[in-house]
Each structure stands twice: as C-alpha cells, then as structure tokens.
Amino acid sequence: MLQKHAKNDHRRHAGEHHVLNWGNFVSQLFNGLVSGALLALISAGLTIVYGTLGVLNLAHGALFMLGGYAGFVAFQATGNFFIAVVVGAAFVGIVGIVIERLIVRFFYNRPEEDQILVTFGIGIVIVELVRAGFGSLSQMVTAPVVVSPIINLGFTIYPEYRLVAFGIVVVALAALYILLYRTRLGMVVRAGIEDATMVDMLGINIQRTFMIVFGIGAMAAGFAGIINAPIISITPNVGDDILIECFVVVVIGGVGSFPGAIVGGIIAGEIMSLTSMFNPQLSQVMLFAVMALVLIARPQGLFGTR
Amino acid sequence: MSFLEIDKINSYYADSHILFDVSMRLEQREVVALLGRNGAGKSTTLKALMSAVDTKAGSIKLDGRELRGARRHTVANAGLQLVPEERRIFGSLSVEENIVLASLTARPAWPLERIYEMFPRLAERRTSRGTDLSGGEQQMLAIARALVRSPKILLLDEPFEGLAPIIVRDLLAICERLAAEGQTIILVEQNLAAALSIASRAYILNNGHVVFDGTSAELKTSTEILSRYIGV
Amino acid sequence: MTTAPRRRRFAFTAELILGLVLIISPFVLPSIGGTSDTLSRILIWGLFGLGFDLIFGFTGLLSFGQAAFYGTGGFISSYLLVSHTIPNVFIALLIGLVGAAIVGTLVGVLALRRSGIYFAMITVAFGEMFFFLENSALYPWTGGENGLPNVPKPSINLPGFDFAFDSPWKLYGLLAVLFFMGYVIARRIVASPFGHVLTAIRDNPLRAQAVGHRIQLYKLSVFTIAAGYAGLAGGLEGTLQSYMSPESFTFETSGQLVMQTVIGGAGTLLGPLVGGALWLYLRNELQSALGLGAAWKLVLGLVFVVLIMFLRRGIVGGISDLYHFLRPTASPPAEATVPAAPVGRPNTPILRRPISDRVVIEARGISKHYGGIIANEDVNFKVREGEIRGLIGPNGAGKSTFFKMLTGEIKPTSGQIFMFGEETTNLDVTAVCHRGVAKSYQINQLFPKLTVRRNLMISALSRARGEFRLDLFRNVDHMDELNADIDETLRLLDLTPRADVKVSDLAYGEKRRIEIGLALGTNPKVLLLDEPLAGMSPQERADTVVLLNHLAVGRTLVVVEHDMDALFGMADQVTVLAQGRILAEGTPAEVQGSDAVQDAYLGGVHA
C-alpha cells in the first residue's frame, strides 16, 4: 500500500497538465529535464560504483531515500535548506563508507549474485530502520524560495524550485565530472575501472580508493534524495521506484559509463514527462518499452562496451 | 646478504602448484636473466615477487625486509616494479596520465622530462589514449610507467615479445642504457640472444624448478643445457 | 544439492517426509500459532518458490521480476472467474498458468540476451513494467488499484460427485496436494537430463556450451517453467483470498521471494517453503506477540544479510551440510592411496590405426586481427585422419587463438575452416562440437560443484541428446547406456574410485584429467588439447602421455604443449607457429633440425 502512495505522488508530479499547448509542452520538457538530471546524478553514482568495484549496489535506492530523511532532519533542526543539503549528503556518504568497510568489501571476490543479494538486504535494513524511526507516513520538506514560488517565464509559469533544483543538479554533475576526469582521484578511479590489480601494482592502495568511490556513489544518491525531497514528499519506500528507474537508465546508457548515465537519465526523464502529457498512466510503461527496444537493438547500451 | 634474496618460495596459481622451492639472489646494479620454456614458471616468479600470485612458503627479502605475503601496493612502494607481459596499459587514460598515475606514490618520482628524453616517441604521443598506441609504443609506455617510480628493481616480463625487429633494437638499447646507469633488473625473455646481451647472470627454470644458475658467458657455451631447457 | 549417488535403495525419502509434514501440520501447528490461512500462504509462496529455485538455485539466473508472472497468472485466472468467462476454477487456474508461461517466454527472450547483473536489472524493470500496465492500460480487466474482488473458491462438480473447497482447511488440503504435485514435478525435472544441463549452466555456462548444449534454449525453457509455477501460485492466491490484489505485481513481491529462497536455501527446492514459513511466522510473531510492529522486516533484513555473509546455503542447505558432515558417505579415498600406475588402462602396446589420406581438419588462409594486433595471419593447416599433430611456438605465437577458431569459439577475420570436408567457419562452438570436434582447455573449465560422475555426464548427455531436448521426466540414473559410457570414461581416466567426489575437492592432477574427460565425453573424432600436461608432476605427465596415446586410437589429435620431450615422443607431425604465422611444419626430427625454428626459440644463440 505504501508503495502505491509513492507511485501516486510520482504520477501526480509527472502528469499535472493534460491540455496540449505550447506552454504545457515546454513546461513538461522542463519537468523531463529536471527529473532526467536527477536520475542522471543517481545513476552516475550507481554506475561509477559498478564500474570501479564491480558491485551492483541494490541499496542505492535506499541511500537516495536516506538522503531525503537526513536532509529532512537537518532542515528541521536548522531551518536552512542549504545546510540540510550539505549535512544530508555528507551523512549518506559516511554511511556508504561504513557499509563498504563493514560488509561490501568482503564481497569483492564473491559471485555477482551474492553481491546483489547482500546489497539488496542492506537496502531493506536501511529502509526498515528509517521506518522504525520516522514511521511510514510521508514527510514534507518545504522548498526554499529565492524570488517567488512560481516564476513567469512568459510563455508558461513554472515552479521556481524546480529551476533551482535543476541548476544545483547540473552543478553537482559537473562537479562529479571534474572529480572523475580532472583530478588525481578520478585518474585512479578510471584506471581502476579498467584494471584494479595493475593500479595496485603501481603502488596505489586500490582498496582505499574503492572505499572512497563507494562513499561518493552513496553521496550522489543521498544528495539527489535531498534535492528531490521538496518535489516529492518522502516516504521510506521512495527509493524503490528510483532504483528501478536507475536500472533502466544504466541499461539504456550502458553499465559503467558516466556519459551513458547522463544521456540515459535525460532520455528517461523526457520519455516519462512527455508521455504523461498524453497519458500519465503510460509514462512508466513507455520507459520500459524503450528499454526493451534498446535491448533488442543494442544490448550493451548506448555507451556500453561490454 | 644480497640485495634481493628469494629463498625456497612455493607459489600457486589457484590450486596448481607452479613454483617449487625456487631460490634466487640479486645484487644491486645487477642485470639477471630468467629463462626457460613457456610454462616453466618465469612469469609466475615475477608475479610471486609482486604478491600477484599466492606464495605459501619461503621468503622474499629486499634489503633485509620480508615481502612475502605483503600487499601488492606495499611491494610496489618497497621498490619492486613489474612491467607485465600483457603490458596492461590503461587504455582510457592518455599516455601522460598513465605515467602520472604511476608516479603518484613514487618516492622519488622521475621527472616527466627524463621519461620523455628516454622515450621521445611517448612525448610526441603524450595526449593519445592508451588504446590508440601501437604495440611498440604500448611497451615503451609500460616500461616508462615502471621507471617513473624509480624502482629499486625493475622486473621485465618478455618486453620484446611480438614486436618488430627495429623496435626490439630500440628497446634493447634502452635496457642497455638502464643497465649502464646502474638500474637493477630481472629480465624474463624468450629471445635468448637479446637477454644474454644485457644480463651478466642467468637462471633457468624448468617445470617450476631452478635448473641452472650461472653467468651468461657460461650459459652461452652450455649447448646441452640450452637445447634441453630452452631449444626445441 | 540433488547430485545424489546413482545407486539409491529408496529414492523417494524427500517426497515421503514432505507428504507426512503436509499431513501432520494442520494437527500440530495451530497449537503454536499457525492458522490455516498462514499455512496456506506458506504453501503458495513455496509453490511460487519451486519455480524460482529452478532458475536461481539450479540454473544460476537471479531474477528480481518473478512478480510479473505471479501477477499475470493471478489476474488472468481471477478475471476469467470474476467475469464468468470460465466457471471452473481449475480450468481458470490452468489458463492462468499457461498465460504466465507465455508471458515468461516473451520476457525471457529479451532478458536472457544478457546475463549476470544485466539480467537482474532487466528482470526488475520488466517486473515493474507489469505493475504499471496493470494499473493503466489493463485497468478494464484488472481493476487497477482496486484489484479484482469476489474471486470464487474452487469446487469439483462431477456427475454424482460435488465437493466445494469452502472451508479454510479444505483449501489447505487442496494447496497441499497441488504443492506436493509441484514438488514431485520439480524433483523429476532436477533429476532429468534437462535438469543436469541446468546445473552445468549454473556452474560454467561457457563449458556447457562448448560440450554441445544450446544453453539459451535451456535457459528460456526453465524461465518459462518458472513463470508457469508463478502463474499457478498467483491464481491460487486470488482464489484463497477471494481477492486478487495489485500488490502481487510489486517489486516487493519479487524481492520477498528472493529473500525467502535465500533464507530457506537456494538449490534445495524446499528452501523457499522453509523461508516462506519463517518469514510469515516471524511476521506474525514479531508483529503481534512481541509488539514490534513494523520492525519484523528489519529483523528479517538483518537475518538475510547475516545469512548471505556466513551461511550462503540457507537453512535447508545448512541442515543438509550438517547431515553430511556428521554422516560422511563412504569417505572417498585420498589421492595418495590411488596407485601411481594407471590400473584402468591395459599395459598392452598401443595399436594405432594407420594415418589415412583423408583430411579431417583444414584451415584455409585464416587470419584473426584484434584491432591493430594480429593474432593469426594467413594460416594454412591440414591434418589427416588418425594423426597426432603437435602445435608449438613461442609465447604469443597465436596457438590458443588458432584453437579457438577451429572450435568455433571465435570467428576468423578472414579465411575458411573445414572439418571432415564440410565448412564450419560460421558455426558456433556448440554446433562444431556436434560435428565431432572437442577441445580440452589450457586452464581447467569444469563444473566445480558437481561430482566427477556428473561432470562427465554433462558431456555424455550432449552426445546422447544433441543440442537441446526437453526431456523433463526422464531420470538420468535410468539411462543405462549413458551410465555405462560414463563408467568406461571413468575407468579410462582412472577416476572410478573418485566418481562421487565433488570436483572442487579434487587434487589438481585429477582435475586436469577431468578436463580431458569432458572433451572426451562428447565422443569427438577430432580432439584438440591445449597444454594437457600443464602444471602436472613428472609422474602425472607420464601417465597422461600414455592416456593420450590411447585416445589417439580411432581419433585425430592436435596437441599444443611446451613439454617438448613429451610432445615429440607422441606427434607424427609438428607445426610451428611464430608471430601468428606458420614458421615450419614436418616430422619432429625435421622441426628440431630446422634453423628457423631454433632461431625462433633461441634467438640466434647457437652453441
């Protein structure tokens, strides 16, 4: 039942406008961009962790949810949304590192199914811990207002927070890009994706890098969770749907590919958003249909090599 | 006590016993060749030094420090550096990134200029991705990546394999120069002439056992040993 | 593990115990808090899990989307009943089962294009797609979020016999009978040749393919069967609750199935039932009795994580391991007690068939390029029937790539390959295997969790049954000719005393012999051996050379080997590859006398 609530919320946010006109179209296009960028950020976290550590983290959706709650708590305490974002993301990053040290690192040499199963279990534990602490009901995080809640763009009016959120997520993606492609850590991570043993043989403690990467992946999910909280109210199960959408994104984009996560995320966001203009109920179905098409035409994904 | 002392190591690849009581020693500034047929255990010996295979018994001492069972990056930072047979270049990284990556934990690291002076070809291709290099360039990069870490001992695993003669000649010249500059090297090589031209001493492995230990000059005249353990 | 020894006195112990438990439960469990409703639900989850265990525990495919088939079966049969299209509950259930199986085939065709994590993600996504379909496009039939109420209870209406399953315990009885039937069928499948191929796919899909099994068809078939089980379970839920809930389609349903199976023990068939029992019992107990509320799922989540970390075989697997630990079955003799001299093979002189003029292997100008790297270039190669051909060359000469092209594991960039005069250039490894060509690998490619006998059986089954056969109800233990062949191979490999030992427990030299045995088991006319002596002790080498000479009778052998003494002792002709090309070819003496060959090996150092 709970899950259904979350889904209803989701659908409401995606399908507010039914009338076909230019303004609505642009508005939906923006909605698609916003949710697409969010999906891209979460999927990037998932795909970097898989690419480097070889572990598909099924707790990723739960970490997204945890970010929302961590932000919610920080927001309650300080009343400052931007402090909430920083505190929440940092908290989830630390949780990620703890999970990696306590459990995940013992699974690097075990079969893929075991890795999937154990992270699935970790996800359930996180969800149920949050449920035990906060209950199952949804919590609201009020969107910060810079100028006014609704902005008139001339051809359409649009919620200000979504524009702000889009900006923040784009900055976060850029930061992730710079971290991966313009820093020494990024160099180690990219080399580790290719050949972790060789990196180790070049004197770099790859295990420590793994831990940091897992933390960064978790942080990306947590960060997105807080940014998303004012758009959809949060419940302990809010991560389930997100995880599945992330899977679609990485299947479309190609597992382990950072550009694939971004392009896949935007594609997924737009598919859901534009479909919901015509038929809100079909928006998710269309997403999976596109995934099936990609599987038939290009099983390794748009940017995948494997 | 020698600079590197390998004492009766027994190494395994999964459950297959590859090295049997292999002992070797190496002095500083020495170049030693490690010879033998395919599957004799030469690469495994180098991997055992790097902790890349499981070594269950014996000891590996570098400058008196025990390295058997140490983690790979610890071994690398202690001063052993392998140039693997498959080269294992990071294809998605540029030439320069490959070298800089290797230098991150090196104390001291070679300056990039010194690398590029030794491998002018790499300087020309510094922005190319690893995957775009030719086989010879990849081999140069693999050696450069090891040298930038100023290793105490350079472990070369078949550096000339599959390369055109002209490139072999260039690489051989570089190895000779390194030897002349005092770089300690263990060289695994099938090309016997090339190996013996730089190495002063040689070991021969056969089925995981050391079957010859002597100078290059001795080996060159031992027809019996050469044809029995290396030839056809 | 169901790899029980072949000669069993009584083969139905598990069925008997299950039957007794199902009969006794209603009389015992209510006293400790189990209601008829709880017991019935456990059976539905158990039935759902039987199918899932076939794909996960036995075939190694981790699907997170089984809810799609559970819901599909449930809604098809419930709709047919609620709309009065089909009055009979049993017929509706059957249609639901078939419908779910058809949907399973369609999803399987797409999802099975990938394996590992991709497969897991794709099944999740398809499961979710069905949830949304139920809620949107299929609303007129499924009732969307409301589901389908008033699903009737089953009844039997025959002339002169009317019986309605109108009480909870009667329904329990029906479910118990259906579960028992489902279990018996699953047991038969597991014991069948088909089931054995599934375990081979789980352990080593590449080798299963190489010994001649069309593994995609096996995976698709078992995926379909699992969907059928799911569909029936879904339909039963509808009729048990009188209500078909859209919850059945959720990711949570798929996830709960996975968790129950792992907690109970995957690969045991009864694991999902036990896991389901624990799940529902804990939920009831923790929720009401201890007043923990929603925390029951937290406890289960923790139990699940701990089990994955430390007891991967789950409860049933753990109990069975403990049982075997306490009661070792006729402890296998250690390697040392096996006589060094091969007892299985006669020490008579080997009578080789003369080499005929017929060319059995021919490569015409084949090349293989990887990007700019040339692995093989313009190789022309002919081997005549009955020959033992040696293939040597320095490291990186392209020997392994050449072998892979001959077996169809990789396609040449250019050139043609002929086996027995017929072109095989474009055939894959499975098809080439059935043309009578087999390879033993340089690095062991075995089925580690199966016994020695079962390993050899995987090869023998391909010979007996071809690329694919859906013989679900045949028992491998009753295939006498097949078992006689396996006994013969065991004797030849000198592994008879080790027949019932798990391969992962063998010594390296023994594994090496099974590696050859797997290739031999398909009864090839052409046997390619990639470094058969690698890693062997001198005694093992000598034994293996004797074995290879025996195998050469009536076969053609191509051997890559670095042990020159051994190779030159066996080979009629030797081909030398260097830098991807043929450098020399001739008798061992000719090759040894060739300056070019000595150059390639010694690099110009001539004493």
Image: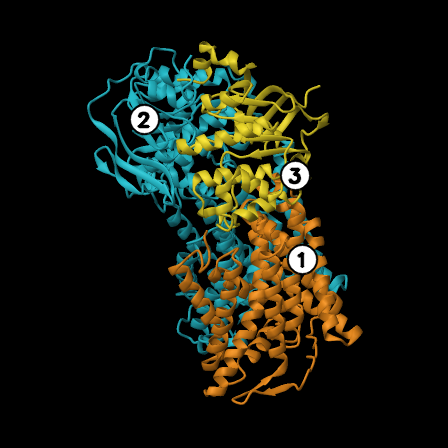
Chain colours: A orange, B yellow, C cyan
Cα gap from disc 3 to disc 1, whole angstroms: 50 Å
Q: Is residue B5 above or below residue C314?
A: above
Q: Amino acid at mark 1?
A: Tyr
Q: Is residue B72 above or below residue C550?
A: below
> Which of pointers 2 and 1 indicates the residue nearer the eye?
2
Q: Secondary structure at mark 3?
A: helix
Residue C281, disc: 1
Which chain does the numbered disc 2 sit on? Answer: C
Image marks 2 and 3: residues in contact by CB distance under 8 Å:
no
Q: Is residue B4 left or right of residue C340?
A: right
Circle 2: residue type: Leu
For marks 2 and 1, give the CA distance. 72 Å
Quadrant (top left, top right, bottom left, bottom right) of the N terminus of chain A: bottom right
Residue at 36%, 40% in the rendered image? C409
Residue C345 seen by the camera: yes
Residue with the mark numbered 2:
C583
Mark 3 touching mark 1, by CB under 8 A? no
- Badge 3: residue crowd in 10 Å (few <14, some 14–19, many ≥20): many
Residue at the outermost left position: C357
